[in-house]
Image: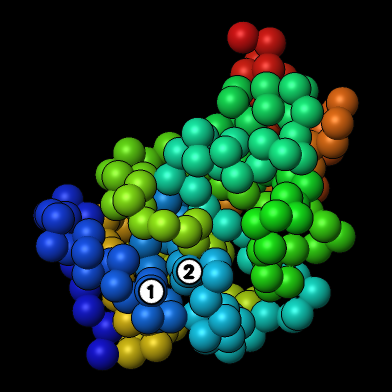
Amino acid sequence: MTKIIKLKEINPEMIQLVHNHLREGEVIAYPTDTIYGLGVNVFSPQGLHKLAILKGREHNKPFSILYSSVERLLSDFSSVLNEYQKFFVSRLLPGKVTLVLPAPPEKKFPPEVVMDNHVGVRVVAHAALNKLFESYENPVTTTSVNPSGMPPARNKGEILGYFKNKVSLLIYDRPVRKVSVSTVIKVTKDSFHILREGAVSIFEIIKKLER
């Protein structure tokens, strides 16, 4: 049965509950600054397997991962990023973007989140969600709440309609008024390339970089 908790009512006991679900290899649903996401512990084979079955996703389409802060992200990726890439991360995150970065070999990210030795990473502009995950030991996956090929869920009813009793925990905030996916950007050593257009336009990206 899917347990539902409200994000605005989160307390230390609920935070521990969320972390325990992740440690046990369960799939949770949570709000972001764009749409609702599905999360599992990135280093849980059981969780990743459950998530892949829920999504009905091809093996060659990796899941992105979510960090609770830019600092934690940069700490994990510092060995593979040059100054330009670190600058790009610090200017664009937190925000409605997914940055595709080189995978740090020492982190040993599983193949479910890696493609061509790169990983898609997010830090969302959602303070309450970041607070929820800041004391959890690992990043979690972030992927839209829908079976592959279906529209992303916008509210509690649609989330449960897709995955009732298959998602162990739903952290609910509010309905999504406008479905808007993150802009996916590959950041190389000296430039960037937009892989998927989304909530943040090229003009906004350039403006953030020129600040």
Q: Position of residue 3 (x, y in %)?
A: 22, 79
Q: Nearer the viewer, residue 25 or 161?
A: 25
Mark 1 near mark 2, Cβ–Cβ under 8 Å?
yes
108 w.r.t. 211: above or below: below
In x, y percent, where is residue 139?
50, 57
Could you classify mark 2 by the number of other residues whose Cα lies within 10 Å: few (under 14), some (14-19), or many (20 or more)? many
**Disc 1 from disc 2: Cα separation:** 7 Å
Which label sits on residue 82? none
> Whole-percent x and y of residue 6?
18, 61
Who's the residue at 57% across and 57% down the image? Answer: 65
Horizontal relation, residue 15 to residue 136: left or right: left
- Residue drawn where x is 68% and y is 80% of the image: 57
Q: Quadrant of residue 155?
A: bottom left
Q: Nearer the viewer, residue 196 or 128?
A: 128
Name the residue carrying label 2.
41
Residue 149 can be seen, yes or no: yes
* Vertical order, 39 against 75 (above or below): below
Q: Which residue is mark 1?
A: 23
Answer few, some or many: residues within 10 Å of disc 1's Cα (few below 14, many 20 plus, some between 14 and 19).
some
From the image, which quarter does the N terminus lie in?
Answer: bottom left
Q: Secondary structure at mark 1?
A: helix
Q: Residue at x 52, y 53 (%)?
A: 66
Position of 136 relative to 113 (above/below): above
The quarter of the picture where the C terminus appears is top right
Q: Secondary structure at mark 2?
A: loop
Q: Position of residue 134 (x, y in %)?
A: 35, 47
Instruction: Give amino acid for label 2.
Output: Asn
Residue type at the position of mark 1: Arg
- Does residue 6 appear in the picture of this structure? no
Quadrant of the rendered image containing residue 48: bottom right
